[in-house]
Amino acid sequence: MFDCHVHSNFSGDSEMDCHSALEKAQDIGLKGIAFTDHLDYDYPDYDDVFMIDFDEYSEFMDKIKEEYNKKLIVLKGIEVGIQPHVLDDSLEVVEKYDFDIVIVSTHVVDKLDLHNGDFCKGKTRREAYERYLEAVLESISSFKNFDILGHIDLIRRYGCYDVNTLRYEDFPDHIDAILNKLISSGKGLEVNTSGYRYNLGSPMPDFDIIKRYRELGGEIICTSSDAHTPDYIAYKFSYINELIEKAGFKYVSYFENRKPVFLPVK
């Protein structure tokens, strides 16, 4: 099994050093791990603590790959937070380095932060969710140099509403548009177990969206923890593998040199 979404202390919101993450990955028997540290240009109230020196990052990851090459597969990745006005700057970074995997995520909508609740202020749950899903579709339509869509339903984490689910049946047209765009573009969907860390009671996305992705013809699906500490690496992966298989998938994927590699669901 692979964990395709992990943050090291290169990301400003993580204090986990790579060696700790890799030792944990070995202890639990992972085949490999992808470090996907943050690139989020023009994040609201941006601070230099979130800026990564990607020259240093790339060189360090190459050394880690070599150090662990007989122990497990280490993948050099990046998680790109997309906003309409940062497309060119983000693309420049993605194209400059030899990443194995590029995750695209929507952390900010209309220049408003999801994490601190600004985006949801003054909006009903339906208004916030619909605009968020529209922004996700805009992101994957305008920024094409990526491999996986990260936490498709991130709004659930920070919505501050009494109901924190995002069901397919509630937003079928918006979700179908996103899933069909991924499929037609040859991109993948992650199943992100951080939903459990945020007490949502399910992975992100929930089973009904995973199943719908498969029904529409989706084939590239990745297991991700979005871990920022060793304890959450590959968290609940045995369970989500069961969900993935139940949804009709015979393979899970990871990316190496920007190409999907398929492994049988176990």
Image (cartoon, rainbow, N blue to C red):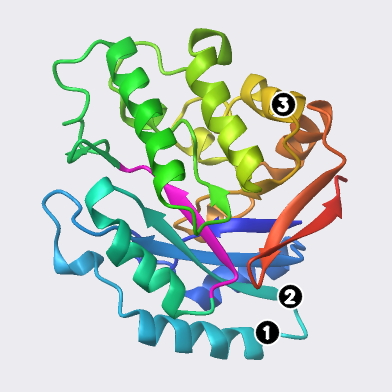
Drawn side of residue 120 relative to residue 57, left or right: left
* Residue bearing the label numbered 2: 72
Drawn side of residue 127 relative to residue 116, left or right: right
Graded by Cα atoms within 10 Å as few (under 14), some (14 to 19) or many (20 or more), the crowding at tag 2 reads some
* Residue bearing the label numbered 3: 216
Residue at figure coordinates x 57%, y 85% from the top left: 64
Please state the horizontal and vertical placement of residue 81, each as a whole percent of the image.
Answer: 35, 52
Residue at figure coordinates x 74%, y 35% from the top left: 239
Instruction: Assign a secondary structure to mark 1.
Output: loop
Q: Is 186 in front, or is 113?
A: 186
Q: Which residues are magenta?
A: 99-107
Graded by Cα atoms within 10 Å as few (under 14), some (14 to 19) or many (20 or more), the crowding at tag 3 reads few
Quarter of the image containing the N terminus? bottom right
Q: CA distance from mark 1 to mark 2?
A: 6 Å
Does label 3 or label 1 sit earlier along the sequence?
1
In the rendered view, tell whether residue 174 sits above or below residue 148: above
Drawn side of residue 115 relative to residue 101, left or right: left
Q: Are marks 3 and 1 in contact (CB under 8 Å)?
A: no
Q: CA distance from mark 2 to mark 3?
A: 33 Å
Instruction: Assign a secondary structure to mark 2.
Output: loop
Please state the horizontal and vertical placement of residue 237, each as a whole percent of the image.
Answer: 70, 44
In the rendered view, tell whether residue 222 sits above or below residue 212: below
- Kindly indicate the quadrant of the structure image that contains residue 162: top left
Determine if residue 166 is in view.
no
Which amino acid does the dot numbered 3 rest on? Leu
* Residue bearing the label numbered 1: 68
Which amino acid does the dot numbered 2 rest on? Leu
